[in-house]
Amino acid sequence: MRFYFVLFLLVTAVGAQAQDPLGGVGNRFRGMRNVGSGSDSLARRDKFEDSITITYRYLDTARAYRLDSSINDITRYFPIPAEYNYMGNFGNAAQSYLFAPRMKAGWDPGFHAFDNYKYTIENARFFTATRPYSELNYLLGTRSEQFIELMHTQNRGPNWNIHFSYRLLNSPGIFQNQKSAHNSYLITNWVQSVNRRYRNYFIVVANKLQNTENGGIVNSAYIDSADYDRRDYIPVRLGGGTRYSADFFNTNVATGNKYADFNALMRQQYDFGRKDSLVTDSTVVSLFFPRVRFEHTIRYSKYTFLFTDAAPAADYYKEFYDLALAGGSNIFSRRDDWKEMVNDFSIYTFPDEKNTQQFIKLGAGVQNLSGTFDTLQRENVLELIQNREKKNYYNIYGHGEYRNRTKNQKWDMMANGKIYFAGMNAGDYEAGASIQSLLGKKIGSLLLGAQNVNRTPSFIMQNPISSFYFRGNEDPALKKENITHLYAVVYQPLLKLGLTGHYYLMTNYSYYTDFYKINQYNSLFNVLQIGANKVFETGKTKQWKWRTEVYFQQVVGGAPLHIPAIYTRNRFGYEGKLGYPKLNIAMGFEAKYRTNYKGDGYSPLLGQFFYQDDQTVQYKLPNIAAYLNFRINSFKAFVRAENLNTFRKLGTNWGFSNNNFAATDYPYPGLLIRLGVFWGFVN
């Protein structure tokens, strides 16, 4: 009901703007691109020479960002980052080729395979806009793949802004039983008192992620058989013989994962400090310099993690999960439900009253958790479980932070820490520090940082009460993971060269060894990751460009971890105006490649990637795509033809059938055509 109410508000808001004549998803920070800080701002003048100034910030940042209107990379507007590997269909489970362990202490339910498609509290944006602004984003792909994203924000006054976002993703897929149907909405609201002492931030986020699971195709060799040139005829392990359906409104998932969450957060701040004013020839501008700030944050969240199979195949569950089908059972499900309530109180002090981006923050919080789980049959009998068991947990933690962005904007320093004193995750902690400097327009910028995290393994891995826990009693208890992360980022603007380095030192690494078994590698090991990006330009106006990204990764030690040694992405093409002042165009070819490695398998019941050491997941050829992107004022359009490398002759027919594989028995599709339209409206 909440979803339909918010959808109504969004439609009403867009309609109201039409009567009043007034890419994307934050990718994981890699140093190669600064999420949210685009190369040019969105500012379109109307016939009266009025313009919009629009910026945004995140809940725990003071820096303002501008909207990105660049067109050379569609992945800025796409939920799956370019460096991610996904299970064959838009909306399926995904993981990065670039190693990035979870660096967060405390309670973790353990389900992250679909995180890319979610709105989150951490990525919620608070806007400031001089005029109402809306975005309508629509992407249409092969076989009725659709992606819709709506956004509207407006200031109701100089000290009050509201923002709505809605996202829908629906993709039937090329192979049987891999349909995805996700929808999410996000509301943010911030208000500040006239005297600037009080601020209130409010966020509502909800996600409903549904993904049909097919367990992979029965035999990978079918990809090279002329008998299966129709890919939706290749038999799969789960879901029966369900055929392709293009019904946009049918979101039913009979066999697969259904994840849902609802989050509401309110943060209140009150400042004590000194009032002042700035007198000009005609006006008096009131000023306020805070010295002490009190902050209270309350958050309520509700999570559901469900796997269901309406027609379970007894052989599959016996072979891969050692579960026997109970006589007469016609459905199988596993479900974890969580409720979370967090109360956090913090105090800030500002050493320099005229620099609010320098502060010291100390705080403490209480987290109350309530989990409801299936009453599992310890004999591992596969059946519908109707009994539910409820458990309550808590955590008490403290945290501190120091930030200093100097007045000349050349240095940005940060140090923070968090420790769990008591409760379910007692002994967990996280600490980090970084320093960033803008050394000059010719010299470039430098970022250095370090992190250390001591964390309890995910709940589903270490607690037998979870509905998704299938370990035997002989397995040892898991110790806390400890991860040290050192990183550096360098960017040289004259050379248009970026360099990154990441070094991880880990112990007690927890992982899945197959579809459900869990193990822990207690010895110390490290991972080195080095990346470089570079733009090469040629031509009289330097409009022909080669954009390249290359990453090298190496695991040192005997850890049960496989990652590709090299991943690279290259774009070759034209970026310019073609003689038309209002036209910006980018067109060319993109090639992505990673070295062959023994890639992780995927467990559909648990929604987890697992370590395997038996089969190499090969790239037959680099993934090649052709693209044509253009922008006129605030209107952007993208046309892409992907997987051109799959063209070959199979039997007597030519077609796009030489599929690469995402994982063992999980092939990528052949040719995909995608058309995207992204339009911003200033009212």
Image (tube, rainbow, N blue to C red):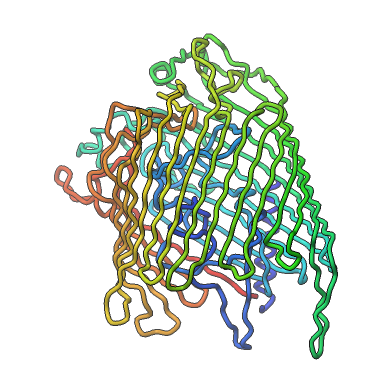
Res. 599 image quadrant: top left
- In the rendered image, the quadrant that contains the C terminus is bottom right
Of residues 514 and 637, the one nearer the viewer is 514
Of all residues, the one furthest to the left in this rendering is 652
Question: Would you place residue 545 above or below residue 389 in this image?
Answer: below
Residue 85, image x, y percentages: 39, 44
7 relative position to 656: left or right: right
Residue drawn where x is 80% and y is 60% of the image: 291
Judge from the rendering whether residue 113 lies leftward or rightward of residue 639; answer left or right. Answer: right
Q: Position of residue 394 (x, y in %)?
A: 72, 29
Depth order, front residue of 143/524: 524
The x, y position of residue 516, in whole percent, is: 46, 22
| Furthest residue in direction front, as rendered | 351
Residue at x 64%, y 40% (from the top left corner): 261
Q: Position of residue 61 (x, y in %)?
A: 64, 57
The reply to whether residue 173 is in sight is: no
Q: Quadrant of residue 343?
A: top right
Q: Examine the rendered structure and indicate whether residue 50 appears above or below residue 384.
A: below
Q: Quadrant of the N terminus?
A: top right
